[in-house]
Image: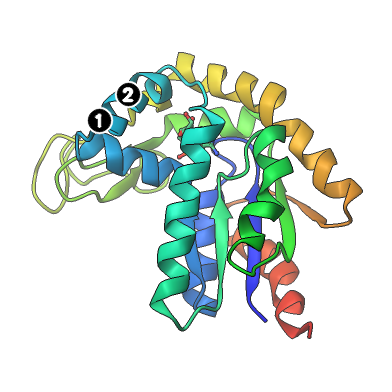
Amino acid sequence: MALNLVFLGPPGAGKGSIAEAIVKKYGLAHISTGELIRAEVAAKTALGKRLEKIINAGNLVSNEDAKSLVENKVGGLKKKGNFKGIIFDGYPRSLVQAGGFEELLGKFNEKISAVVYIESSEEQIVKRLSARWHCPKCKKDYNMIFGPPKLKGKCDIDGAKIVRREDDEPEIIKKRYRVFLEETAPVIGFFEKKGLLKKYDGNAPLRESIARAEKIVAPLLMQP
Ligand code: AMP
């Protein structure tokens, strides 16, 4: 039986890094809708050009666009074979997406195993996201508090000028947090009512937060 997990939490809760650690350990696939959208933007596709302004302003893209990106990706992963399950990082992010998610997975004979909600305070996420920079050339990530580059503002690997994601600017972070409270927070209750919700306190250093997530995920793998 495949393990399909939804990771929920405000921007900066660590969903992406935690998902990355868990998929590596358990051989799962990782679908980040934010990454899928940024890939479209980077490839300058018609869709990417349309979505770029929306994400840079801190708003959600339409439910239709988000759903079709996820649906294509799930279809591709199922075709590949050796399917062990998926961590959905950043989807569903609205009640409309949540309401249609079981049906979407059902098309591929899959279902949601659990929804993991990573609780994080606003203070914590603003601190985390403002510290998050990367090299636009080689994509190496830098945390300006815990792991800044050796030379100020320059990538350790290729010397390129490091940058912040446009939507990680402080004003846009606040906007994204408001959008989370308005659009995504109701999704938590939606899955709680279905008995699928598992939550934990994510106000901890990343390594500890990963350990807490693993404590939730490991027993799910034992289930028949
Ligand atoms: P993330 O990398 O998860 O923080 O996502 C970056 C941005 O992509 C978000 O601020 C939204 O603009 C957009 N996005 C990601 N996932 C979704 C989704 N499920 N629905 C709508 N917009 C999304």
Q: Is residue 102 above or below residue 11?
A: below
Decide if residue 72 is on the left or right side of residue 97.
left
For label 2, the crowd category at 10 Å Cα-Cα, with few meaning under 14, some 14 to 19 and many 20 or more, is some
**Residue sticking out furthest to the top:** 171
Image location of residue 133, percent across then percent down:
32, 37
Instruction: Kindly indicate whether the residue at mark 1 contacts the one at mark 2 (C-beta within 8 angstroms).
Output: yes
| Residue 48 % position (x, y) | 29, 32
Residue at x 39%, y 37% (from the top left corner): 132
In the image, what residue occupies the spot 75% across and 85% down?
222
Q: Which residue is mark 1?
A: 46
Q: Is residue 64 left or right of residue 55?
A: right
Question: Which disc, if any, is residue 93?
Answer: none
Q: Nearer the viewer, residue 87 or 140?
A: 87
Look at label 1 and name its amino acid.
Answer: Ala
Q: Residue at x 73, y 41 (%)?
A: 99
Q: Residue farthest to the front?
A: 107
Give the amino acid at mark 2.
Arg
Identify the element where label 2 is drawn: helix
> How far across and down, in percent of the image, does residue 72 sit?
43, 54
Where 21 sits versus 65, above or below?
below
In the image, is 36 to the left or to the right of 91? left
CA–CA distance in space, label 2 to label 1: 6 Å
**Residue 131, percent across and down?**
42, 34
The crowd level at tag 1 (other Cα within 10 Å; few <14, some 14-19, many 20+) is few
Quarter containing the N terminus: bottom right
Q: Residue at x 47, y 44 (%)?
A: 68
Query: Label 2: which residue?
Result: 50
> For residue 76, which quarter of the picture?
bottom left
Q: Secondary structure at mark 1?
A: helix
Q: Nearer the viewer, residue 213 or 4?
A: 4
The relative height of residue 112 versus residue 32 in the rendered view (above or below) is below
